[in-house]
Amino acid sequence: MNAQYENWAANIDADIAAYGTPTPLPPLRTELDGVVLKCAADLTPSPVRWLWQYWLALGKLHILAGAPGQGKTTLALAMAATVTMGGRWPDGSIATAGNVLIWSGEDDPADTLLPRLLAAGADRAKCFFIEGARRDGEVVPFDPARDLGQLLAAIEKIGGIKLLVIDPVVSAVAGDSHKNTEVRRALQPLVDLATACDCAVLGITHFAKGGQGTDPTQRVVGSVAFSAVARVVMVAAKVKGDDENKDARILARTKSNIGPDGGGFHYFLEQSEPLPGIQASHIAWGKAVDGTARELLTDPEDATDGDGEKSALEEAMEFLVEILKDGSAPSKYVESEAKDAGIAPRTVRRASEVLRVKKRKMNGAWYWFKPNLANELGQLGQPINVGQVGQVGQVEQVEGRDDDPF
C-alpha cells in the first residue's frame, strides 16, 4: 500500500514539474456589485478634531490664497513651525505637537524654506521636505498628481505627521485647472490622503487677477472647485483702510464648512537672522479682528489707476489660450468654463476681441475659433502682456452681425 501511494505521489510531482503549479482559482464572490449603503443608526456622531481651532482640522483639506507678496508661504511655514514646537497659535491656544511635511514647487528647502522655519522657531528634527519620487530605480521630480500613493507610504513610515503643506496646490491638478470636473477629480486624492493620514492638508494658491470687491472665496485662481472641495478657505491680503499700519496684513477665514467663518488676525512680515549669515522672513502676529473677509481685506490691485481692468483682461486672455488650445471650442462651453473660473462674460468677450478670436455658427451652434493661438503668442503658461498682443482685431461675423448669445 505504501509503495502504491509513493508511486501515485511521484506521478503527481512529475505532472507538476511538467506543467507547472496550477493557477489558483479566484476567490468565490459572495456579494453582487451595487451601491453600498450605511444606516445612520449604525454610525456614531463624532466631532471635528482641530489642529488649530476653527482654522486647521485634522483629516481635512484647506486652501490659503492671496495676491503675490502677501507672505502666503511664510504664513504656512509659521503654522508648520507652531506644530513642530507644540507652540501657541495667534489666539493663544496650544498646538498639538507633531511632524510636518512640506512640498514646494517654487522654493528651495535649503536656502528659503528651512531658514524661514528656523526664523519661526521650528524644531527642524520634525520638519520633512519632499525632494522627489523614485521611478524605476531613479529619483524624479515629485508630481502630486501622480505620486500621492508613494507619498502616503512615506507618511506612514515617518509617522506623527500633523500638517502637510502643498505649494502650490494647483500642481496637484494634471489637467486644466479652470475645469471644475478635472479639479474635483484631481483634489480627491488629497482629500483621501488627509483622511488616511489624519493630518491637516494646506494647499497654497493665488488670487485671480481682477474681481476686486467681490467675495474673496470667488477670487481663488482657477476653478471654483478649489474653494468648494476645501473645508476651510483662508485668505491673506492688505488691511483695508489702515493708514497707520500700511505694512499690516490680515489672515482671514473666508469660508468654512465645519466651523465659523469670518474673523482673522493681523500679521506683519519681518526679517531676522536665525543663523549667522542666514537672513529669513517670519510672521509677527498682531491682534485679532472681527468681520467678514470681504469687509476686512483689500489688495494692492485695488488702486484706481486702471491696473485692475488690465489684470482682469490678461487673466481672461490666459484663460482663452488654455480653452482654445485645440483650435476651437463651443460658445456654451467657453461660457460655462468662464463662469467656473470667476471671469466676467464681458471680460472674456473683450479678451476674444484682443486675441482676434473668430465666432462661427455651425449646425445651429456657435463656436469660437483661434488655431495656433498659443504658438502665435509664444507664451502658453506665461503671463500675457496686453501691450505685446497688438491692436484689437475684428471679430468675424456671420451675415454682418455677431449673434453669438455668450
Image (cartoon, grey):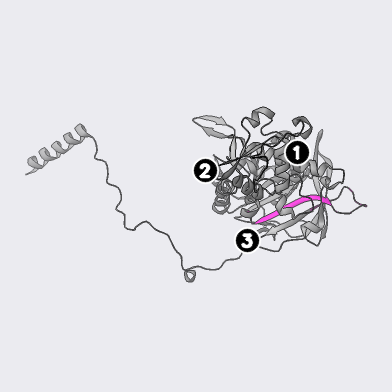
The mark nearer the N terminus, 1 or 2, is: 1
Identified by mark 2, the residue type is Gly
Q: In the picture shown, does residue 145 fall above or below 64?
A: above
Front tag of 3 and 2: 2
Badge 2 crowding class, 10 Å Cα cut-off, few under 14, some 14 to 19, many 20 or more, is few
Q: Are marks 3 and 2 in contact (CB under 8 Å)?
A: no
Which stretch did the figure color magenta? 230-250
Q: Nearer the viewer, residue 86 or 181?
A: 181
Q: Can the viewer see residue 144?
A: no
**Does residue 246 belong to the magenta stretch?**
yes
Q: Is residue 32 left or right of residue 364?
A: left
Count of numbered circles in the view? 3
Report x, y in % for residue 316: 71, 42
For the residues marked 3 and 2, what is the alpha-carbon distance in whole angstroms? 24 Å
Q: Which mark is residue 49?
A: 3
Q: Can the viewer see residue 283?
A: yes
Identified by mark 3, the residue type is Arg
For the residues marked 1 and 3, what is the alpha-carbon distance in whole angstroms? 30 Å
Q: Which mark is residue 149?
A: 2
Q: Which mark is residue 115?
A: 1
